[in-house]
Image (cartoon, helix red, strand yellow):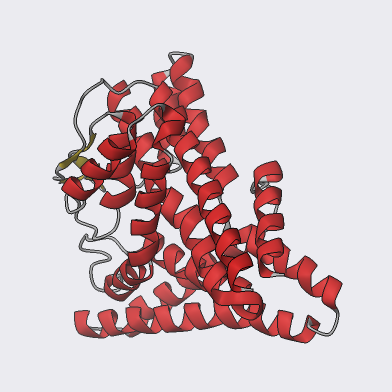
Amino acid sequence: MNIIDILAALVIDWIIGDPYWFPHPVIYIGKLIRFLENRGRKLCKTKKALKLYGGFIVVAVSAVSFLIPFMILSLLKPYKLIYHVVNIFILWTTIAARCLHKEGKKVYDSLEKEDIEDARVKLSYIVGRETSNLSEKEIIRADVETIAENTCDGVIAPLFYAMIGGTTFASAFAMMYKSINTMDSMLGYMNEKYIDIGFFPANTDDVFNYIPARLTGILMCLSSFIVKGSMINSFNIMIRDRKNHKSPNCAYPEAATAGALNVQLGGNNTYFGQVVEKPTLGDRKVELNSYHIVGAIKLMYSSEVIFVILYSLIYMVVY
């Protein structure tokens, strides 16, 4: 039944995404993280203590995020129909393909209207870098990179942990991953404010994304035909440029996307007023254009579909 629940959650995400009015679990995970962060900054008087407290945040938030869905589903196990409805519901909240599509497309729509100011504002909602002075091509690059990176974080990785969780732990594993990724998004910055408290959240996220990031890159290479790209070129670029990023994981989906679209991604970005130098990914065979945003979205969906098809085939063979 695990594969049926995953497929149902996938379809629901495709249809309705993440409605703005919905009290999403990540909102409450974020509130817990912020509460613990504020407490830690008051309690910890040294950098070492703050770093260790960051480890406590990882353990506490991960445990809560795992145990709540696990306990709810354990209580509902005798009631099969209700159990699967709730399991599907929780799984749905961990997948963000439709949301990523919607938010990334907003930037594209603004650029198509030649409203660069609005494109910068829309982009600022989904990236950590400063967007107020970005050129059109820099906006496109940032949007494509974000869609590529979040294909792992928001789509493939939650599905991966739901799949390895099996019937019993699917939702709990997926939600625990979601909490780890949220901690990294909120605390995992390499600036003076977060470098200590964010040390363990950032490194834990790196560990949990190690397999999903590489898997996402491979799936994007397999999907390259969707955007009239070359699978071989996409693989070559991914392997060649896989280390061209400060993150041990992000370069895999981003380089695979660059190879599939025949564009160059990467380069310097500004975060909190500080310029972060980054190497490039891919070859500039064609100049970045707004339609590459649509191409990145297509790669995201096709990677998701291929992943679920492969899992379904393996599931049927094994079970």
Residue at point 24%, 58% (across, down): 247
Left or right of residue 126, residue 7 in this image: right
Residue 232: percent from the left, percent from the top? Answer: 28, 39
Residue 12: percent from the left, percent from the top? Answer: 71, 50
The quadrant in which the N terminus is found is bottom right
Q: Quadrant of residue 283?
A: top left
Residue at point 83%, 76% (across, down): 80
The front one of 186 and 234 is: 234
- As displayed, is residue 184 above or below residue 305? below
The quadrant in which the C terminus is found is bottom right
Residue at point 53%, 42% (across, down): 301
- As displayed, is residue 9 above or below residue 124? below
Residue at point 46%, 33% (across, down): 122
Residue 82: percent from the left, percent from the top? Answer: 84, 72
Residue 279: percent from the left, percent from the top? Answer: 14, 43
Q: Is there any visible trace of residue 129 in the rendered image?
A: no
